[in-house]
């Protein structure tokens, strides 16, 4: 019996393995249609050799095997890719994904069309999801920018890793690590040999000129300090990101890399001191006569077409340089970036026979860590999220400043609410920023899908980089999590939710147009609260049963339609969002009150807040119901206490709290002061 069970298990496992292999080969056949057979995946990184008529025609591989690709959801993202021997992608197809944005409006077909754009791409080309001069454009999926960035990174990193390991980019490209990057200062670059230095004093140069029969450099009779610096010269290979990005900065380095051919090389030359390695004759002759690049028996004289000026060296600790430049050495020159070379400096001097030159050699050897064979290890470029944060640094700065301003508003709320006009300007000014900039411009609308993704990540192996690829969402969630401890759910719902801001602004306009408002009896209103909690719990539970099936149900949130896509969507979704806004004309923030599952999710920990910021009087709820009646979301119970699960911290009740024209206890106090003042005036 035991033997039979073991045999059956073996047969089942074998059948499952065969099915997986069949599915993989079928995917390879679709992305490499010119091949008639494939070998088993092998090598580092693993890739299957593609054959046609018994001849090798390229490779097929899965991004998950090569670079361990994960999607924005944190779950596996696997794309099958074909790559021919010329380094061109023959096809790309999504094999597995669990992206949270795939609801009606953004479909599987949209993502399939996105990856299909890589067919025919030469992986030596620069690729961008935005318009950049001289760069191949890949159109991102509308409404799924983060997922597009993640997939673009997976395709390019995997394809280039396989190409380098199989020598498809040439021997030098395979041996030179162009992608790895880690921040390094000027001194660190010098210490590891990424930069080479030559310092010459006036005395050294004059002695060398004397040996070749020339006089001292410069005009006759010129007096110079013999120990002073004649030139302090630096050179380095700037093609690898580990050197070039540290010297030039990411933007300039990428722009230069985009402007050159795949096997061209960037040489960095910079100097300070009396002597210029450029001189001035090159402007007329087109040749830089004061420097030569020597490698083996080959001597290269830089020409004008190679020259790119460098205005600023960004490496930390870089000295003040008189001149800095990049020279683009073409592939056809025979220059090999993996082998040692030297820069020779030629200093002219006058002699009886005319101009003579003293030559000074500056040897250079590329750092060993950049020369490790690519077959030993896949390239380890900078994390994807780091590049995204650098790209979005300006927008992140705007959000951080706005959050600091909001914090000041909340901390010093008493000073604001005492002045009704100031409060209204602050309140609606910030809501306008939230809707127009944060929502419609930046698309930074938080969603229940973020909560579900975070919870699943905690259960399936948490990784910060999954969330760091969306900088604005990460910053906002970090702030919301912190403010939950101090103010509860109201900071997000009342101030940072673009759809909430849209509802409040629309209702404000409705009031100005004298559209009648509906106030539900509190007993009905209180029972309608539970709807959003039922919706939240249902969606949250379903997400852990079948994550893919629950995604369309997230459309109960109109955020994507109204904010992220700005109503540019199929009519049923637009109609749903407009219907919610239409109800909001009569019942302010109706969606927030009764239907929003994200508000319910944030309300659950709302009672954990550490402070009570909203002030109440003993008369509230007993002698006075004004705050309860004027609360924008009816979060104040008839007995006067504020329900933190429903309060959006709009501060309207605090305006009334300090208003001696609205609050009955303050009205009575004001009237007593006025009567006393009139009595004193009458007595005098």
Image (cartoon, rainbow, N blue to C red):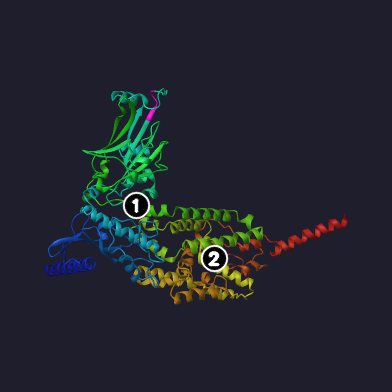
Question: Is residue 616 in sight in this rendering?
Answer: no
- Binning the other alpha carbons within 10 Å of mark 1 as few (below 14), some (14 to 19) or many (20 upward) gives some
Going from N to C along the chain, the mark reached first, 2 or 1, is 1
As helix, strand or loop, the secondary structure at mark 2 comes to helix
Q: Which mark is residue 448?
A: none
Query: Is 19 one of the magenta-colored residues?
Result: no
Magenta span: chief secondary structure: loop
In x, y percent, where is residue 332? Answer: 25, 48
Q: Which residue is mark 1?
A: 259
Q: Residue at x 35, y 54 (%)?
A: 384
Vertical order, 52 against 393 (above or below): below
Distance between the alpha carbons at the discs numbered 2 and 1: 45 Å
651 left or right, relative to 196? right
Which quarter of the picture shows residue 168?
Answer: bottom left
Could you tell me residue 464's position as x and y percent?
Answer: 37, 55
Q: Is residue 664 something one can see in this rendering?
A: yes
Query: In the picture shown, does residue 244 fall above or below 82?
Result: above
Q: Which residue is mark 2?
A: 501
Question: Is 292 situated left or right of 276 in this image?
Answer: left
**Neighbour tally class for label 2: few under 14, some 14-19, many 20 plus, Cα within 10 Å:** many
Query: Split into 4 quadrants, where in the image is the C terminus?
Result: bottom right
Q: Quadrant of residue 512?
A: bottom right
Where are the magenta residues, as a range? 226-230
The reply to whether dot 2 and dot 1 touch (C-beta < 8 Å) is: no
Residue 275 appears at what percent x and percent y? 38, 32
């Amino acid at each position: 019996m035991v033997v039979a069970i073991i045999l059956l298990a073996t047969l089942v496992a074998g059948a499952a393995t065969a099915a997986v292999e069949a599915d993989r080969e079928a995917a390879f056949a679709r992305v490499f249609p010119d091949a008639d057979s494939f070998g088993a995946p092998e090598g580092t990184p693993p890739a299957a050799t593609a054959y046609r008529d018994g001849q090798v025609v390229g490779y097929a591989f899965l991004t998950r095997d090569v670079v361990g690709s994960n999607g924005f959801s944190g779950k596996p993202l696997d794309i099958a890719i074909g790559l021919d021997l010329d380094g061109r992608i023959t096809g790309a197809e999504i094999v597995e994904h669990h992206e949270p944005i795939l609801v009606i409006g953004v479909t599987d077909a949209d993502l399939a069309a996105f990856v299909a754009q890589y067919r025919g791409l030469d992986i030596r080309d620069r690729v961008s999801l935005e318009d950049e001069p001289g760069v191949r454009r890949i159109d991102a999926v509308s409404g799924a920018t983060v997922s597009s960035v993640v997939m673009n990174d997976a395709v390019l990193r995997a394809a280039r890793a396989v190409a380098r390991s199989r020598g498809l980019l040439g021997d030098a490209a395979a041996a030179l690590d162009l992608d790895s990057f880690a921040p390094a200062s000027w001194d660190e670059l010098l210490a590891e040999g990424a930069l080479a230095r030559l310092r010459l004093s006036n005395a050294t140069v004059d002695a060398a000129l004397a040996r070749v029969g020339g006089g001292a450099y410069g005009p006759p009779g010129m007096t110079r300090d013999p120990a002073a610096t004649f030139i302090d010269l630096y050179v380095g290979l700037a093609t690898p990101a580990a050197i070039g990005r540290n010297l030039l900065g990411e933007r300039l380095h990428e722009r230069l890399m985009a402007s050159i051919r795949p096997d061209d090389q960037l040489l960095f030359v910079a100097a300070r001191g009396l002597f210029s390695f450029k001189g001035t004759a090159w402007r007329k002759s087109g040749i830089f006569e004061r420097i030569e690049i020597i490698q083996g028996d080959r001597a290269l004289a830089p020409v004008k077409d190679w020259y790119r000026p460098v205005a600023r060296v960004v490496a930390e600790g870089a000295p003040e340089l008189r001149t800095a430049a990049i020279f683009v050495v073409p592939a056809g020159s025979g220059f090999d970036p993996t082998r040692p070379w030297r820069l020779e400096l030629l200093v002219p001097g006058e002699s009886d026979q005319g101009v003579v030159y003293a030559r000074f050699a500056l040897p250079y050897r590329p750092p060993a860590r950049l020369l490790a064979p690519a077959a030993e290890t896949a390239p380890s470029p900078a994390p994807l999220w780091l590049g995204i944060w650098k790209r979005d640094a300006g927008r992140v700065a705007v959000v951080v400043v706005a959050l600091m301003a909001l914090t000041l508003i909340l901390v010093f709320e008493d000073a604001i609410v005492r002045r009704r006009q100031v409060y209204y300007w602050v309140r609606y000014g910030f809501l306008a920023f939230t809707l127009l900039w944060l929502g419609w411009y930046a698309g930074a609308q938080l969603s229940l899908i973020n909560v579900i993704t975070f919870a699943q990540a905690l259960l399936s192996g948490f990784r910060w980089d999954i969330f760091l690829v969306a900088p604005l969402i990460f910053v906002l969630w970090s702030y919301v999590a912190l403010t939950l401890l101090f103010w509860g759910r109201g900071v997000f719902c009342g101030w940072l939710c673009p759809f909430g801001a849209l509802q409040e602004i629309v209702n404000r306009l409705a009031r100005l147009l004298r559209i009648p408002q509906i106030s539900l009896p509190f007993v009905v209103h209180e029972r309608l609260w539970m709807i959003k909690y039922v919706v939240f719990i249902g969606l949250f539970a379903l997400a852990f049963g079948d994550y893919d099936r629950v995604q369309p149900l997230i459309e109960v949130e109109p955020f994507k339609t109204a904010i992220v896509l700005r109503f540019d969507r199929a009519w049923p979704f637009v109609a749903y969002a407009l219907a919610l806004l239409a109800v909001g004309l009569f019942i302010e923030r109706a969606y927030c009150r009764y239907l929003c599952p994200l508000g319910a999710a944030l309300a659950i920990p709302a009672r954990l807040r550490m402070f009570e910021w909203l002030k109440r009087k003993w008369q509230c709820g007993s002698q006075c119901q004004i705050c309860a009646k004027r609360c924008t979301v009816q979060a104040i119970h008839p007995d006067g206490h504020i329900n933190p699960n429903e309060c959006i911290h709009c501060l309207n009740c605090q305006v009334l709290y300090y208003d001696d024209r609205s609050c009955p206890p303050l009205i009575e106090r004001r009237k007593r002061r006025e009567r006393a003042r009139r009595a004193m005036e009458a007595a005098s």
